[in-house]
Image: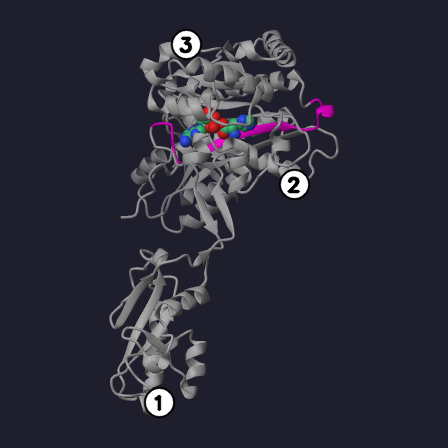
């Protein structure tokens, strides 16, 4: 049985009802904060991520789903390489194991059209069939393909119809690149055909593509590509969609997961750099989580400063690590060299006392960055959004500057970050765009839903009525009534006239209906229906015209 790939999963009802409720709620909140939706492609040029998220990050260095698009098999190159390695320099004195290319005018054109090379092996002087020579038809293909084998067999049939080859043995040979091995489709029957792999590179590719591991890079690319900043206004964009990371799957960590994110980006003249934007985004998140119904979240806040601050801080970290790094885990030893900031992310308990004593980023912020961070904190205090400062919070992406943050939730276990984000003032320029400071976040929707479910949140989608036809000929009447109810805004599910009343009641309960509405001959005649509340057992009769309103109460 074919199953969903490891790290991916199906989202099924009734869980999807909760997902949809969250989506609807966040869209409503985004609208209230004047954010508008952007939908960027699910795959992008690989360079977009290496240049934004950063070559040295876990995401780019080991978690991306990347492939080469437009991979082309270069048949001529393989043919030439094979001939160079196999063709005899001197056809008159053919050496053992080497080939000469045959020239038989009657067959040649057709074979060339089929991409088949006609060669012979063995010692011979004149062209044409001679005793002791072995004929071969050679085809070149990217892999052991059904089509190439058919072509070879067809070519041999064709040759047999020519009188001079009627009785000749013709060996069929398929040459594929070594890279093509292992790509063989299972239905290929290789009987009769010898396959040989030839070393070398015979595939060329045009573009490296990657399934998006996150959406900020795509949004900033779109911002630059469409000149969204040209009007001098701030862009407030949000997205909801799947992201892909080849992580080791565990609870709360998937290879395809969903993010709800937003980016606020624009020219500095539009106020994009102001600490007020940071505070507005963080206040929106507090509102969003509250309104979605998440309780007990924690906001962890940090400032990673600007590029200059980070260079000085990295230097300080390197110096502080130098005498102690040999006592730390192998990851830390590597990171101390490549990206010392990542050492702060280490989870090894033995390394913690060393990490606690390392220099703090807060001491390396320059005056403008320090003032910016102070202003953000002051505004959060003013609107009553509580936070804790976490100077060890290192986000797993390299584009951040100044404010960074994560919201965590206790109900999530090891993967406790419900969302993460921060400022990325240099990202547009790093991608070849204009100066466009920005700040954004992405909520891990899988984790948000998990946290809501851990709180006991139920998907509260209830269908108003189960319409139960009773007796022969009542299906059409029930469909008509259900149609009227649905058009009037009530939700309705529909039974079948073949069901007995008891079965209809059972199905109504399973469907999660609030009421069951019986549609029998008498009800239709009277144009009023027996309606029973499935929870209380209370039954009333309601005229057709009032039914939708009654059900929706
Ligand atoms: P991130 O911290 O890599 O940031 O991801 C944001 C959130 O996505 C995480 O806090 C987590 O809830 C969720 N998440 C990440 N990986 C997985 C996974 N494998 N399975 C389930 N959930 C996951 C970003 O992606 C940035 N683009 C956020 C941002 C937007 N910064 C500025 N603008």
Residue ranking furthest to the bottom: 163
Label at residue 207: none
Q: Residue at x 32, y 14 (%)?
A: 349
Left or right relative to 92: residue 550: right
Q: Is residue 300 visible?
A: yes
Q: Nearer the viewer, residue 274 or 416?
A: 274
Residue 257 magenta: yes
Question: Which residue is identified by label 1?
Answer: 162
Residue 333 is drawn in which quadrant?
top left
Mark nearest the camera among 2 and 3 is 3
Q: Nearer the viewer, residue 231 or 452?
A: 231
> Which badge, 2 or 3, is on the more N-terminal residue?
2
Looking at the rendering, the stretch of residues picked out in magenta corresponds to 251-271
Left or right relative to 269: residue 56: left
Question: Which residue is identified by label 2?
Answer: 225
> Which badge, 1 or 2, is on the more N-terminal residue?
1
CA gap between label 2 and label 3 equals: 43 Å
Q: x and y percent of residue 411 in the render?
A: 38, 18
Q: x and y percent of residue 45 in the render?
A: 53, 43
Q: Nearer the viewer, residue 350 or 382?
A: 350
Question: Which residue is identified by label 3?
Answer: 356
Q: Secondary structure at mark 3?
A: helix
- Mark 1 in CB contact with mark 2 (< 8 angstroms): no
In the image, residue 536 above or below residue 163: above
**For mark 3, does the 10 Å Cα neighbourhood hold few (<14), some (14 to 19), or many (20 or more) residues?**
few
Q: Secondary structure at mark 2?
A: helix
Q: x and y percent of residue 277 in the render?
A: 64, 19
């Amino acid at each position: 049985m074919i199953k969903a790939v490891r790290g991916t999963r199906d989202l099924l009802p009734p869980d999807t009802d909760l997902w949809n409720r969250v989506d609807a709620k966040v869209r409503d909140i985004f609208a209230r904060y004047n954010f508008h939706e952007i939908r960027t492609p699910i795959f992008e040029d690989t360079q977009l991520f290496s240049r934004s998220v950063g070559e040295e990050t876990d995401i780019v260095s080991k978690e991306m789903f990347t492939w080469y698009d437009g991979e082309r098999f270069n048949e001529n190159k393989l043919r030439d390489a094979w001939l160079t390695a196999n063709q005899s320099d001197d056809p008159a004195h053919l050496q053992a194991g080497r080939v000469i290319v045959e020239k038989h005018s009657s067959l040649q054109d057709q074979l060339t059209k089929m991409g088949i090379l006609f060669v012979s092996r063995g010692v011979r002087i004149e062209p044409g069939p001679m005793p002791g020579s072995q004929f071969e038809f050679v085809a070149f293909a990217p892999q052991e393909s059904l089509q190439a084998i058919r072509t070879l067999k067809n070519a041999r049939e064709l040759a047999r119809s020519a009188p001079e080859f009627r009785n000749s043995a013709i060996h069929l040979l398929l040459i594929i690149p070594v890279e093509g091995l292992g790509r063989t489709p299972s239905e290929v029957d290789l009987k009769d055909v010898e396959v040989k792999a030839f070393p070398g590179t015979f595939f060329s590719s045009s573009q490296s593509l990657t399934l998006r591991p996150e959406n900020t890079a795509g949004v900033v690319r779109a911002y630059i590509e469409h000149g969204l900043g040209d009007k001098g206004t701030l862009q407030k964009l949000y997205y909801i969609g799947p992201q892909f990371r080849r992580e080791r799957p565990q609870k709360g960590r998937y290879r395809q997961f969903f993010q709800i994110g937003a980016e606020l980006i624009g020219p500095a003249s539009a106020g994009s750099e102001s600490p007020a934007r940071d505070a507005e985004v963080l206040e929106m998140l507090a509102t969003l989580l509250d309104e979605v119904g998440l309780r007990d979240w924690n906001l962890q806040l940090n400032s990673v400063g600007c590029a200059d601050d980070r260079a000085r801080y990295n230097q300080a970290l390197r110096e502080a690590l130098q005498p102690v790094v040999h006592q730390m885990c192998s990851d830390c030893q590597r990171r101390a060299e490549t990206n010392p900031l990542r050492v702060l992310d280490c989870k090894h308990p033995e390394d913690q006392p060393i990490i606690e004593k390392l220099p703090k980023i807060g001491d390396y912020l320059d005056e403008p960055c320090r003032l910016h961070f102070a202003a953000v904190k002051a505004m959060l205090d003013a609107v009553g959004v509580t936070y804790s400062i976490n100077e060890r919070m290192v986000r797993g992406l390299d584009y951040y500057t100044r404010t960074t943050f994560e919201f965590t939730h206790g109900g999530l276990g090891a993967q406790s970050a419900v969302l993460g984000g921060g400022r990325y003032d240099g990202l547009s320029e790093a991608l070849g765009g204009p100066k466009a400071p920005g700040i954004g976040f992405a909520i891990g929707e899988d984790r948000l839903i998990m946290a809501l479910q851990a709180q006991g949140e139920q998907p509260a989608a209830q269908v108003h009525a189960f319409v139960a036809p009773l007796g022969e000929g009542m299906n059409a009447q029930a469909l008509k009534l259900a149609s009227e109810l649905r058009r009037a805004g009530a939700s309705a599910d529909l039974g079948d006239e073949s069901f007995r009343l008891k079965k209809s009641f059972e199905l109504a309960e399973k469907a999660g209906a609030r009421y069951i509405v019986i549609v029998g001959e008498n009800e239709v005649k009277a144009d009023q229906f027996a309606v029973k509340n499935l929870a209380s057992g209370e039954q009333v009769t309601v005229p057709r015209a009032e039914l939708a309103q009654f059900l929706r109460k």
